[in-house]
Image (cartoon, grey):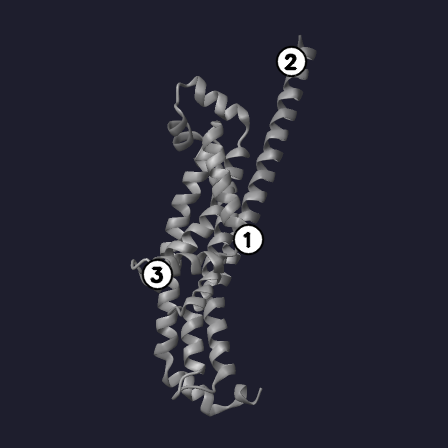
Amino acid sequence: MSGFFSLKAWHQVWTYRETFELGLLNTVETALVGVLLSLVLGIFFGLMATSGKKWLKCIARIYVEVIQNTPVLLQICFLYYSLAFSGHSMGIIATGMISLGIYTGAYMAEVFRAGIEAIPGGQFEAAHAQGFGYVGMMYHIILPQSIKIILPPAVNQVVNLIKNTSCLYIIGGADLISQTYNFVTGATTGGAYAPAYLVCGVLFFIICFPLSKMASAWEMNLKKRDQKMAVSVKSRKIVMAETGERKKVAV
């Protein structure tokens, strides 16, 4: 605990702040590419899961179950070392982007599936009646309506992906956690454990907290909007009923 109040330790962290900046940059870069990949996979397998075709649903289910029920650390190590031993190593950061994208994609697929299935069946029937095919129906009618359901949990998965970049430490990554560990164990920088890990935690918090709050705010706004719409529809029905009663009395 004494290191936390050590001016020398804090000065050391400040002097080598480029180490933390590089780790933060690598973490953000890994997270951005991972998020894009997870969204592509989430939409793809989410649509497969709601396609109504058994073989497509089966493929989507296998992907989701296998990925969700194995540790992300195992998936990172498997991808990295299997490629390395086969002579096709792609680098630690690239491995992190792909493995985290695939891992989070399984959860995104469930988010999209749940969002699509939450749309009333009448919307699907109306789309078919209008002559829309499956892709057109999803693009023009179903997905735009499901966005409000999908966004909050999707943002939460983005936050989880950012935090999971710390798992790259297991393969000697250059992410924020790895850079912090290299700093506190370095021959010339070692010793400033408490300040270094505190700075690392603050940087993660600065990235993840606004996203978490944004997801919560979206969810609250959507609930309030749905409540207002429900009240508005109810009021309209009451007015129409009263108008109908007056017309009957007048007749």
Position of residue 229 relative to residue 239, above or below, is below
Label 2 belongs to which residue? 247
Label 3 vs label 1: CA separation? 44 Å
Label 1 belongs to which residue? 216
Q: Position of residue 212 (x, y in %)?
A: 52, 57
Label 3 vs label 2: CA separation? 83 Å
Q: Of the residues under marks 3 and 1, which one precedes in the sequence?
A: 3
Label 3 belongs to which residue? 85
Q: Can residue 20 be spotted in the picture?
A: yes
Q: Position of residue 74 (x, y in %)?
A: 48, 58
Q: Can residue 111 be spotted in the picture?
A: no
Q: Are marks 3 and 2 in contact (CB under 8 Å)?
A: no
Looking at the picture, which amino acid does disc 1 mark? Ser
Label 1 vs label 2: CA separation? 47 Å
- At 51% across and 46% down in the image, what residue appears? 66
Q: Position of residue 143 (x, y in %)?
A: 44, 35
- At 37% across and 83% down in the image, what residue appears? 16
